[in-house]
Image (cartoon, rainbow, N blue to C red):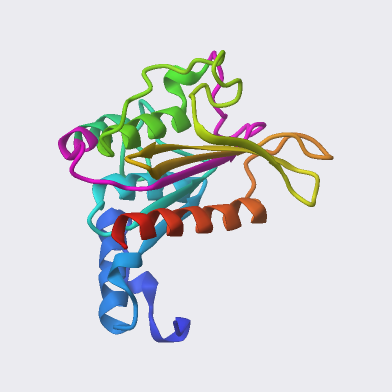
Amino acid sequence: LDADAVDLHALVGPDEDGIEQVVYYLLKTYPQLDASRVYTEGLSAGSATSTGLGIRKSYLFAAVGGFSAGILPGSYRFDCDRQSLLGEAIQKSGAVEMPYFSATGTSDTVVPFINKDNWQKNAFFAAWQIYQIMNGMSVTERPDFSKDTIFGITLENRETIWTNKGISMETGVLSKNGVPLIQYLCFGQSIFDGAGHEYHQHCGQHAHKAVKEAGAQLFG
């Protein structure tokens, strides 16, 4: 795309409707784009926004990737809150399938990762539950860290991946009818220390691959 040819700042508003209008504008302006392959991903505040877009604008996006944020319980931020998104997820439950990739660092101090003390108000756990509901999957009512010491959820394809930079990635998926719809990934120990709020290239590569594969399985 020619960035000079499109003034996105003139199009986008401060909310999800503005983002939707940008997508429609781009699809109209560039007919070579595949409307069935539109993805939303974001980091931190962008992650919270993308997570909300996947629920609110489920007809627009093929899959969602969230890095270092989820849904902030008990507060209205980034044009959404847990209660309103929960209501929409319940209405769409089973009728919409939206692949969701959730990633963060276990040592994040900005948006803390889930643990036995914070899970009831944890942004990641709230997002996982809401996407389970909308996708018509079994809902994890509370984490059980005796089943999985990292995520508190029994996952398929559970593995630890070490990158060539000496960073560990814990990952696993939840599937519906054989299709992986929610993929979990967190950065744990590295040769330096635990991973925090920052973006990691390895995580981005993993996310792009995951959402495209899930979209391909759902939409052919």
Point out residue 187 in the picture as x, y percentages from the top left corner: 66, 39
Q: Nearer the viewer, residue 126 or 131?
A: 131
Q: Nearer the viewer, residue 85 or 186?
A: 186
Specify the principal SS of the magenta part.
Answer: loop
Which corner quadrant of the image does residue 142 belong to? top left
Q: On screen, 72 above or below 28?
A: above
Magenta range: 88-117
Q: Nearer the viewer, residue 94 or 203?
A: 94
Q: On screen, 192 above or below 50?
A: above
Which corner quadrant of the image does residue 127 belong to? top left
Point out residue 1 in the picture as x, y percentages from the top left corner: 44, 82
124 sits left or right of 52 in the view: right
Point out residue 70 in the picture as x, y percentages from the top left corner: 44, 38
**Residue 162 drawn in magenta:** no
Q: Nearer the viewer, residue 117 or 78?
A: 117
Q: On screen, 206 above or below 169?
A: below
Residue furthest to the right: 191
67 sits left or right of 212 in the view: right
81 sits left or right of 104 in the view: left
Which corner quadrant of the image does residue 29 belong to? bottom left
Q: How many marks?
A: 0
Residue at image point 56% right, 20% down: 115
Q: Quadrant of the C terminus?
A: bottom left
**Residue 101 drawn in magenta:** yes
Residue at image point 55% right, 34% down: 111
